[in-house]
Amino acid sequence: ANRAQLAWSSRVMVVLDDASLDALRTPTVSEGGHVPPAEPLEPIEKILRTDERCFASIPKKIFPYEPNYINTEVHGNVRIHYLDEGKKSSKETILCMHGEPSWCFLYRKMIPGLVQAGYRVVCPDLPGFGKSDKPSKQTDYSYERMVNWMSEFVVKMRLGNVTLFAQDWGGLIGLRVAARLPERFVRICISNTGLPVGTGGTKSFMNWAYKTSQKFPTWGAVFKLTCRVPLSKEELAAYDAPFPSEAYKGATRVFPKMVPVTKGHASVEENKGALRRVYSRWRKPFLTLFGDRDPITRDGEKGWQRLVPGAKGQKHVKIKGGGHFIQEDRPQELVKHIIAFVNDNPLPAKLRARL
């Protein structure tokens, strides 16, 4: 009997021989000689919190929204800030996720139109950004930790019947959250984002990630240079408000280096898994609204339209004049297309139970 059991177990057990171990080892240096950030193995020791006075100079007329907070516990006690506008009893929730180096301020021009259409609109600040807590070390952050934090956020907020709208890192994270919690999401709409799987980064992107982004003195300057619609001094200052000193910029410095564009990056396999296991089978409505003037994700929407079954037959739009921060450049056009997307793909007559 023991021999039979051993023979059976040898067929199903994964034997970590030398060849298997070699295949599991991740390169410590990626293409171009860059060292990608490693997955943190230690607990977060110090968390910073931007003083509310840093945001006091933002005029109410351009950002009239009240702050809300929720504590996450998955990686210690990390407080997440979010906007929660519209009726909480609404059947439809739009979850708007920002990237870097922005925060929920990016959605200020879109919120009124979405609320007027009858939706609840939830806009969280990622940990390390905006009014959310900021672990102090760059090594405190990883792609997987961000997915964990925002998955807990969605669960603790008891969000259901969610339409995700995500741009930049908001898509890298939000798409993974939706893949982890697919039953909570009824539609997905993405703009200027993707799920990189280590196929390589352009020379200009690698230069940005490892050099230019590490030296920018203020993040308002990024928006001044990249937004196609001029921003006021108050708006540019609002993008600097969360980061009163270099000590608060850990996330904004490491995020460009975290994008898994090479085989040596963490989360390459996790992204491949999400694409293979979830999005190649995703039949719920899926829409792309990419900007035609975004140099970072040019033509990135085409792969999603081919891969995702739920993207077939949708009214995908290449938004003219939309740069990378398309929420600043074409906010009302985004709102119009999101509302049409929801209306064209109504919820089932029998609503899903609240989760």
Image: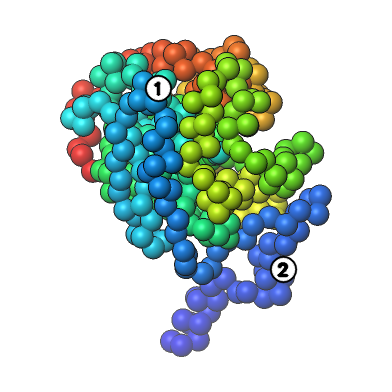
Which residue is rendered at x = 35% and y = 39% of the image?
Answer: 82
Question: If the image is split into quadrants, where does the C terminus sit?
Answer: top left
Q: Quadrant of residue 138?
A: bottom right
Which residue is rendered at x = 33% and y = 19% of the image?
Answer: 112
Residue 235 in the image, given as x and y percentages of width and height: 50, 26
Which residue appears farthest toward the bottom when viewing the image? Answer: 2
Residue 198 in the image, given as x and y percentages of width and height: 68, 46
Is 195 situated left or right of 59 in this image?
Answer: right
Answer whether labels 2 and 1 touch (C-beta < 8 Å). no
Q: What count of labels does the image hold?
A: 2
Residue at which label 2 appears: 22
User: On screen, 302 above or below 182?
Assistant: above
- Mark 1 residue crowding within 10 angstroms, few (<14) / some (14–19) / many (20+): few
Is 21 situated left or right of 137 in this image?
Answer: right
- Mark 2 residue crowding within 10 angstroms, few (<14) / some (14–19) / many (20+): few
In the structure shown, which secondary structural element does the residue marked by tag 2 occupy? helix
Which residue is rendered at x = 51% and y = 69% of the image?
Answer: 42
